[in-house]
Amino acid sequence: MRQFLMLLIFIFSEFAFAQNESQNLSDTYERIYVEAGFVQPLGKLSEKFDLSPSFGFWFRNKLSQDDFVDFGFNFFVPKKPLNVNFEYRDSIVQYKSSHFAINIGTRFAKIIPLSQRKTDFNLEWNSGIGLALNFYNAPKELEFEDGEHTKEVLTTFYLSQGIKLNYRNTGLQCHYQWSPYGIFNDKVEKNFGSQTLMFGIVYRQ
């Protein structure tokens, strides 16, 4: 997983370099967004884990004067995760969280200036879509035959909607996200949960 994240960062860095070469030097804006905050599960998902720390890295590209598109990821570490029921052959087995989940995708950003004199004080309206993954491990006491997988990855798409309030190089953000984890996995318990609220601080450069 660490190698995968490093590969993503490398790809985004190469993309950023290429864009920098093609952009007019006078057309400057913040391209790198580094985020830190928390994920609050809502509804049924609130039974699976508690308020958890979240971190993100996004690269921004300009579409028009006030419209942008971001590419990147957010990951979070579930706190006090509940064991989750999965079907294994003819049995129901409780899998343990591997304490790692990640969202990889893109989001559209609309900039709304809040000052006529200060261009670095603005509000962002964000709409996102991408891939959401949540990792679980089988309990150690469960014996598997050769070749059997001991992990489950809940994979689904996500949709998000949120806002950012930016001043100079820092900002505050809040996003609602819908990730229907059980829609593509028929082994996980029904009504797993799908809603989260993500909020925190942003540093942009």
Image: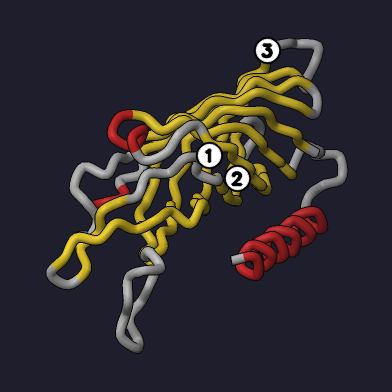
Residue identifier under label 2: 70
Asked if the residue under mark 2 is in contact with the one under mark 1, i.e. CB atoms within 8 Å, the reply is yes
Q: At 63% across and 42% down in the image, what residue appears? A: 55
Rounded to the nearest whole Å, what is the CA distance between mark 3 and mark 1? Answer: 19 Å
Q: In this orientation, does residue 160 appear?
A: no
Residue annotated with mark 1: 108
- Find residue 90 and report its image quarter: bottom left
Which residue is found at the position 31% from the left and 51% from the top?
Answer: 84
Labels 3 and 2: the sequence-earlier one: 2
Q: In which quarter of the image is the C terminus?
A: top right
Q: Nearer the viewer, residue 128 or 1?
A: 1
Name the disc covering residue 146, or none.
none
In the rendered view, tell whether residue 172 sits above or below residue 52: above
- Kind of residue at badge 3: Leu
- How many residues crowd around disc 2 within 10 Å: few (fewer than 14), some, or many (20 or more)? many
Residue that numbered label 3 is attached to? 114
- Find residue 136 and report its horizontal and vertical position in percent: 41, 59
| Marks 3/2: CA–CA distance | 21 Å
